[in-house]
Image: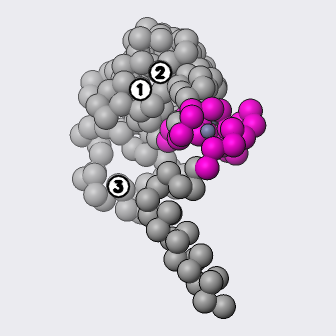
Amino acid sequence: MDDLIINVDALEEANQPFEADLPRDLLDEVLRADPPTEFHANGAARLKGRATKLGRKVLVQARATVPLRGQCRRCLKPVMLDEQVDLIRSYVPADQLPGRQEHHAKGSEASLDPEGVDEEPYEGKEIDLKPAVREQILLQIPGSPLCGEDCKGLCPRCGKDLNEGDCGCDRTALDPRWAALKGIQLEKKKEK
Ligand SMILES: [Zn+2]
Ligand SMILES: [Zn+2]
């Protein structure tokens, strides 16, 4: 399969497997679009999935492991991770698809799909998976890179990586608001 296009006429069996490359350029295009995420692609990925045709309706389930790299937002160290991206879509010929508001209503009796499966219209005989892939990548990658949940970040005063130990700087005095607060607390103590 090239260019993430499924030819509907070529789908013969249920659960027909397919594979497609997600080149690094394509992943970067998704990640660096406007507004850009804080990640870059760290390589290419491979989309593997299955497609089932029900009449002219096509259910697509696919998965890719996307290699990402970024910079920890606290300590600025490089962060690399593989993010699994899942895609489940039901593609319906554009002329068979009811109004978008209607099919987005949850529990709609007209829909035979399992709840939560997004329906997408397609025209002609070809389904382009690219928009769905783009959407799922952006939905499923983390908000911003973090080397670890407990990353202590850098000292704002001397720049030392606090994960490697404390630098001994008095960081509480850096922010004038904190300094003022400290003063108030000290005064209260004196009153007692
Ligand atoms: Zn970090
Ligand atoms: Zn320091």
| Callout 1 secondary element | helix
Is residue 157 a member of the stretch shown in magenta? yes
What range of the chain is rendered magenta?
142-170
- For image coordinates 28% across by 57% down, the residue present is 101
Q: How many marks?
A: 3
User: Circle 1: is it few (<14), some (14-19), or many (20+) Cα within 10 Å?
Assistant: many
Residue assigned mark 2: 40
- For image coordinates 43% across by 59% down, the residue present is 176
Q: Say which amino acid is labelled 3.
A: His
Q: Give 53 or 90, whichever is nearer the viewer.
A: 90
Q: Give 85 or 110, whichever is nearer the viewer.
A: 85
Q: Position of residue 16 (x, y in %)?
A: 59, 22
Q: Are marks 3 and 1 in contact (CB under 8 Å)?
A: no
Q: Position of residue 97 (x, y in %)?
A: 30, 45
Q: Say which amino acid is labelled 1.
A: Leu
Q: Is residue 84 above or below residue 42?
A: below
Q: Is residue 66 visible?
A: no
Q: Which mark is residue 153?
A: none
Q: Which mark is residue 103?
A: 3
The image quarter in which residue 48 lies: top right
